[in-house]
Amino acid sequence: MSDLSELYQALILDHKQHPRHFGALADANRKADGYNPFCGDRFTVYVDVENGEIEDIGVEGEGCAISTASASMMAEEVLGKSVEEAEERFEQFRRMMADTADDADYEALGDLEAFAGVRRYPTRIKCANLAWHTLHAALTNQETAVSTEA
Ligand code: ZN
């Protein structure tokens, strides 16, 4: 168990130091802003949805190690997936952070289980959830579509 938690800590650190898919997306057709006032984490999630699939994703902003690593791993996880699958993963991640996830949830979450350890620090749960909530907002609020000039 401690080996696994060391592995997960290394994974979170790697994503914090080298966030994947960071940067604004010029051709995004969905966008949402996320802010966690408890920590000061602030991210904008840009998504390019084509034919119901997440063809490209970009994250812009700054936050603590947990929120940054979570945003990076979220982007990596949902890129190329259908909106439906991404929304399902959002629900599964949320259940994991609320400690109500079942075995099937954990199986689908894979390495995202790295954030389960964050539950020991209740104030940081919002940090882990932020990027996922922002993705959800981007995918469900079509009126927040970003202009191509943005
Ligand atoms: Zn944070």
Image (cartoon, helix red, strand yellow):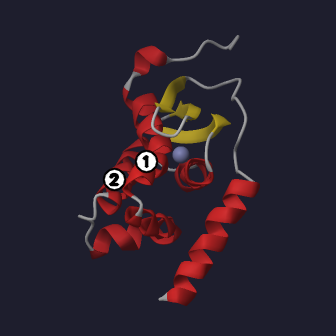
Determine the secondary structure under disc 2. Answer: helix
Please say if 48 is above or below 55.
above
* Secondary structure under the numbered disc 1 in the rendered image: helix
Residue 87, given in percent of the width and then of the height, sits at 37, 45
Provide residue 6's location: percent of width, then percent of height: 60, 80
Question: Which image quadrant for residue 63?
Answer: top right
Left/right placement of residue 135 relative to residue 7 reads left
Is residue 52 in view?
no
Tell me the crowding category of disc 1: few under 14, some 14 to 19, or many 20 or more residues within 10 angstroms, Cα based: many
What's the residue type where badge 1 is placed? Answer: Asn
Q: Is mark 2 within 8 Å of ligand 1?
A: no
Marks 2 and 1, how far apart at CA:
7 Å
Amino acid marked by disc 2: Arg
The C terminus sits in image quarter: top right
Can you give x and y, in whole percent of width and height, for residue 79 in the image? 58, 48
- Residue at 68% from the left image edge and 55% from the top image edge: 16
The extreme right residue here reads 18
Disc on the earlier residue, 2 or 1: 2
According to the picture, the residue beneath numbered tag 1 turns out to be: 129
Residue depicted at x 50% and y 26%: 32
Q: Nearer the viewer, residue 65 or 38?
A: 38
Residue 37 vs 20, above or below: the answer is above
In the picture, the disc for residue 117 is none
Identify which residue is drawn at 70% across, 29% down. 24
Q: Is there CB contact under 8 Å for labels 2 and 1? A: yes
Mark 2 closeness class: few <14, some 14–19, many ≥20 residues within 10 Å: some
Residue 22 in which image quadrant: top right
Between residues 147 and 39, which one lies in front from this camera angle?
A: 39
Look at mark 2 in the image and give the residue it sits on: 94
Name the residue located 47 percent from the left edge and 89 percent from the top edge: 1
